[in-house]
Image (cartoon, rainbow, N blue to C red):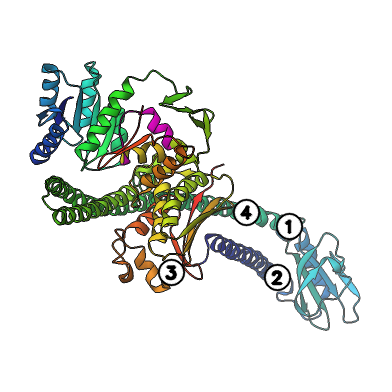
Amino acid sequence: MQSLRTLTVAFLALFALATGLTGYATYTTARRTIAMLVDRRIAAVADTVLEDVAPGDRATILARIDTLSRRRDTGDIGFELIDPRGTWLGGNVALPRRPPVGLSTLHGTDRIAGLSTGRALVRDAGHGLRLAVIAETEPVEGYGPVRLRNAVIGFGAIALVVLGGTVMFGLLIRRRIGDMRSTAEAIVDGDLSRRVPVPAGGGAFAAQAVAFNHMLDRIVALMTSLRHVSADVAHDMRTPLARLRAKLERLANDATSTEQAAALEDAIAQCDALLAMFGAVLRITEVESGSRHAAFATIDIVSLAADVVDSLSPLATKAGQYIAMDAPPALTVTGDAGLLGQALMNLAENALNHTPAGARVRVSIHATGERATVCVEDDGLGIAPADRALALRRFGRLDASRHRPGHGLGLPLADAIARLHGGALVLDDARPGLRACFTLPVAN
Amino acid sequence: MDLLLVEDDEPTAQTLAEELRALDHRVVVAEDGAAALVAVERDSFDAVILDRMLPRMDGATVVRRLRERGRSLPVLMLSALGRWDQKVDGLDAGADDYVTKPTPAAEIDARLKALIRARGWTSTEAETIRAGDIVISPTQHRAWRDGVALDLARLEFRLLLELARQAGGYLTRAMLIERVWGYDFEPTANIVDAQVLSLRRKLTGNGGDDPIVTKRGVGYMLQA
């Protein structure tokens, strides 16, 4: 599909060509028609002059020429009679050039006083006498330039109207498309309430906007219902789980043996893991609803990341791992501090949980133009390219990680948070290990 | 303390009331907002524990009504959905603190005590804070124990500051996560215990007793 601009240019070129051809055709047709009418007239006049004249009767011919020259309706016609040797015998004009027998065209170059273009008819009057009848094909002086000017003004006005109309039409279409695009982008950014403005007065654009808005209503309804279902499930599971946990806790307090107490502690830990999982589901739906967009502020992402690294560093050291940071002294971005802290914490915890003792985890931040890139990378086994999409899906835990701590929602949650900030979580090969990166809008 | 627990789910209300009584509180249960408003007029309570989602009148409306009637007693709001916008709504309505269910009774107990202690404060942010032989200057970001300057990392300093502000009272892990880290989620890794451990090492580096008390299942307290 060509761009709107290409289509417009092609249309205007075709229009100019058609206008030019029409102008040319009109011009030449008019000229030919006039020539044809003039031809008929001079032929009729010549017939009148030579009617019933005996061959070679020059006196009658000259008398008729004289009569016709005086008449109002034929007074503009030129006559010339010459003998076989080319001697001028009479008439009201003397032609410097002898036109051939029959019809021919006269030009300004023929140097006939008062004639710029015209037609000539030469007839044989018997005994070698030649009668030439000439008439102008221009009704007024300088008719050609006048016609050209009229054509330019007429067709030029049409061309201007079409050009202006095309530009306005293009702007209108561009604005409508722009409205739709900005609405779609706002929806993607989490503002689910945005709709395309419906132009007043109905018409195709209004119908289009209404149809587009209907589609958005439907999408939002589906998204909302999906979110509600997962939020409702998570919520309704939390309440009975909380009761179960409270009951287990009371039993643990009254435990009579250490084995019993240990078993109950284990059950409580499993309850907590389930609660954490439902908490993460609720958090993902909250992030995806886009409601936290309203509370975006200017924050220093480096200080947030430093808190995460400083918090996990003692735990990493205990496990024989190493976590460090590579970042400028400060970098302000626009975002939600709580959520970005959670995304960084999830990614760093994920890296530490999936690598053995001796592993090195690096949190890096750098600004590239309008976006800041935040990466967490480790030197563990990484995730095979084919499994990366699955790793970002809710509950899409890879088989190898099922026995590890965590609820399998760390990466999907970090992805949802990255998307809220206008990016996405990208998993990559750190050669060796996993690199998880996302970008944030740099604050001005 | 005399507590009013407003909770419509009866098993949850019973369990929580029982646990709070085990922590030496007297608990009255109200099952909806209207009953809660009546109870507050009739008896005097030290604090209200209020569920966010109640039939007919929701928790935020109940707090608003209480505040409109000039009742300034501490209100701790509980919510099953730990949603940020609901938390903002609840705090805007006049609640003093907001926690996500399921909340252990010990957590509620610690938070209520912290709320009541906080009401006794008259100090401003800029003032030097003292807890035992520990002195903290929040503006200078410096702390001393027994006159000797402490070399604390950023998180350690913020942790000591929060503990000192509540000296003599327990702060739960969840409260420390909120106040020291500013997070509204609980990381899987036990980052609080790790920071407390390194803070303890630095506080006792030049001798002296460990001023931080650990209470299992509750949290940490800096001795006053």
Q: Does residue B170 show up magenta in the picture?
A: yes
The amino acid sitting under disc 1 is Tyr
Q: Chain of mark 4?
A: A
The amino acid sitting under disc 3 is Gly
Where the C terminus of chain A falls, by quadrant? top right
Q: Earlier in the sequence, mark 3 or mark 1?
A: 1
The amino acid sitting under disc 4 is Gly
Secondary structure found at label 3: loop
Secondary structure found at label 2: helix
Q: Position of residue B84 (x, y in %)?
A: 32, 40
- Is A226 left, or right, of A11 in this rendering? left
User: Quadrant of residue A318 in the image?
Assistant: bottom left
Q: Earlier in the sequence, mark 4 or mark 2?
A: 2
Q: Which numbered circle lies on residue A48? A: 2
Q: Earlier in the sequence, mark 3 or mark 2?
A: 2
Q: Nearer the viewer, mark 4 or mark 3?
A: 3
Badge 1 density bin: few <14, some 14–19, many ≥20, Cα 10 Å:
few
Q: Nearer the viewer, mark 3 or mark 2?
A: 3
Q: Earlier in the sequence, mark 4 or mark 1?
A: 1
The residue identified by callout 1 is A143
Give the alpha-carbon distance from disc 3 to disc 1, as whole Å.
87 Å
Q: Which residues are magenta?
A: B159-173
The residue identified by callout 3 is A382
Q: Confirm whether residue A87 shows in the render.
A: yes
Give the alpha-carbon distance from disc 4 to disc 2, as whole Å.
41 Å
The residue identified by callout 4 is A154
Instruction: Tell me, yes or no, whether the two marked residues, 3 and 2, touch with CB atoms within 8 Å.
Output: no
User: Quadrant of residue A166 in the image?
Assistant: bottom right
Relative to the observer, which residue lies in front, A172 or A100?
Answer: A172
